[in-house]
Image (tube, rainbow, N blue to C red):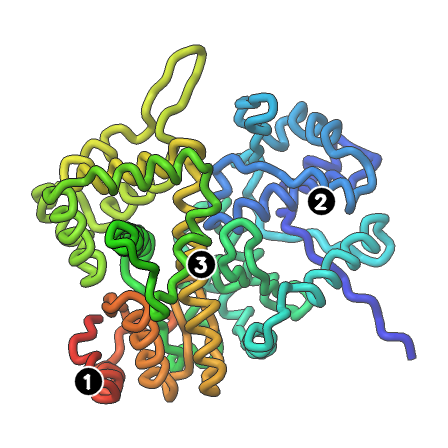
Amino acid sequence: MMKPKTNFTLFLPDSVRKVIDLYFTRNRDAYYYIVHCILLKALQNGNKTNKFFPVNMAKIEKIIRRRPVPLLKDLKDVNIIQNDGSYMPHLKSLHYRVNPKLLLASDFFVVTPQSYIYNQLNGLYTKKNTNRDLKKSYLKIMYSHFLKLKFDCMSAIKFTNTAEITNDKRCAYLYSIELLKSKNTRYFKRNKTNTRLDTNLTNLYKPLRKFIIGSDNLISIDLRNSQPLFLTILILETTKMINYKHQGETLPLCFTFPLSDFLSCLDNSVIRDFYKFFNFADFNVFEEFINFANLTFSGTLYSYMLNLFGNRYSKDRIKEIMFEIFYSKNIIQRKNKGFIPYARSKRLFASAFPNVYKIVHLLKQKSNSDLANMLSKMEAYVMIDIICEKLVSNDIVPLTIHDSIIVDKKDAAEAYKIIAETFLTLFDRVPSFSIETIAGEKLSDTDLHHILNFAQNSNAKNANMPI
């Protein structure tokens, strides 16, 4: 008996579909798919459906079997989608979003085998499910474990429909639930740009995590201030390399962190300026670096900045400031004039850490994405390529949310020990972690004490491992 074909669900709220149906009688499925891609991009970037994002023209063309540009223009002409109006030849494409006023309902469009885009979608999902960069055995084991994850979709939908959130966010959250319903629409892949492991969990609205079946027994070991920490590691490892070079020595065999691999993704002129900065740095510069390193490894960077700025900002605002500094462009040129985005945030950070800010600025001088991608690659190398492989080899199969390792409660102590030992081996220090359930519930003092003491007692060198 032939197996029935699977339907595919597009992220297409009913309110948007009705407008498409009103204006277009031909190629409706193609218009549906384009809107789906725009909304999905927003979902994959933190549910920011009010932001503009680029679209993958080649991917869309493969599915709809026609050039997408005229259809994008059609959708814009009737105000179903909007673009940022910022096109620069050979530098930047137009970015798009769905008109926020249309994101009112929470229904989705089901693509049946009768649709002309069905076969292309079927091929896309089949490829996703069979070619996920899972060449390494430990990733295959993690993927199988991820597919077995059970989720209470009905309760999650009920919660989302009654939550006090905007309609566009409601649509995004409901679609993230929709993707978890079927194994066919669960994704588990390495990001080609920053090598992070992207799954349905990495974009799941945090309050929805409690609807994972057994969430009380899933413990999250979450690296604190991850991006500033890996900037610290970049600085410390670079200093180590330069010191060995000045002493005329080669790096010892125990130097296992492949810093050169990460730096190689930068433009040669940026690498040259980066090393030049360190070669001419004086004592005061390195004293600042030591202070920054102590704050990031202890997980107290945000608290330090709160106190430094007289508690004028919330902790969440301090985190936003850090993202603005790390991810924004150094300067934006418009109509022959240049301005510095988030200038106030950058002045604040530079007043506290002038030389750290100089490094951040230097590493973004060619592209504002260079620094973020490099730090994410460093994070992925440590958390996925080393720690996850070690965990699986010790019969602990984790789930991950970027800088967070999620394991069963019974394995938490052993997992934390492996994580701590990995950082100690690579960087001679163990950073600070937040340890709680995957839903964000704090552990009892007894459980937390057991996890930490197990790791400390297993290795005398780990006597001071902060959380």
Q: CA distance from mark 1 to mark 3?
A: 39 Å
Q: Residues within 10 Å of mark 3 (few under 14, many from 20)?
A: some
Q: Residue furthest top?
A: 336
Say which of marks 1 and 3 sits in front: 1
Looking at the image, tell me whether mark 3 or mark 2 is earlier in sequence order. Answer: 2
For residue 102, what is the image quadrant?
top right
Q: Position of residue 186 (x, y in %)?
A: 62, 65
Q: Secondary structure at mark 2?
A: helix
From the viewer's perspective, is 461 left or right of 72?
left
Looking at the image, tell me whether mark 1 or mark 3 is earlier in sequence order. Answer: 3
From the viewer's perspective, is 317 left or right of 198?
left
From the viewer's perspective, is 357 left or right of 138?
left
Q: Amino acid at mark 3?
A: Tyr
Q: Residue at x 24, y 41 (%)?
A: 279
Q: Residues within 10 Å of mark 1 (few under 14, many from 20)?
A: few
Residue 59 is marked as 2
Q: Secondary structure at mark 3?
A: loop
Q: Looking at the image, which is closer to me, 139 or 199?
A: 139
Looking at the image, tell me whether mark 2 or mark 1 is earlier in sequence order. Answer: 2
Q: Amino acid at mark 2?
A: Lys
Name the residue tied to disc 1: 460
Q: Residue at x 38, y 79 (%)?
A: 216
**Residue 222 appears anywhere in the view:** no
Q: Position of residue 193 (x, y in %)?
A: 53, 49
Q: Position of residue 4 (x, y in %)?
A: 84, 71
Q: Looking at the image, which is closer to me, 187 or 382?
A: 382
Say which of marks 3 and 2 sits in front: 2
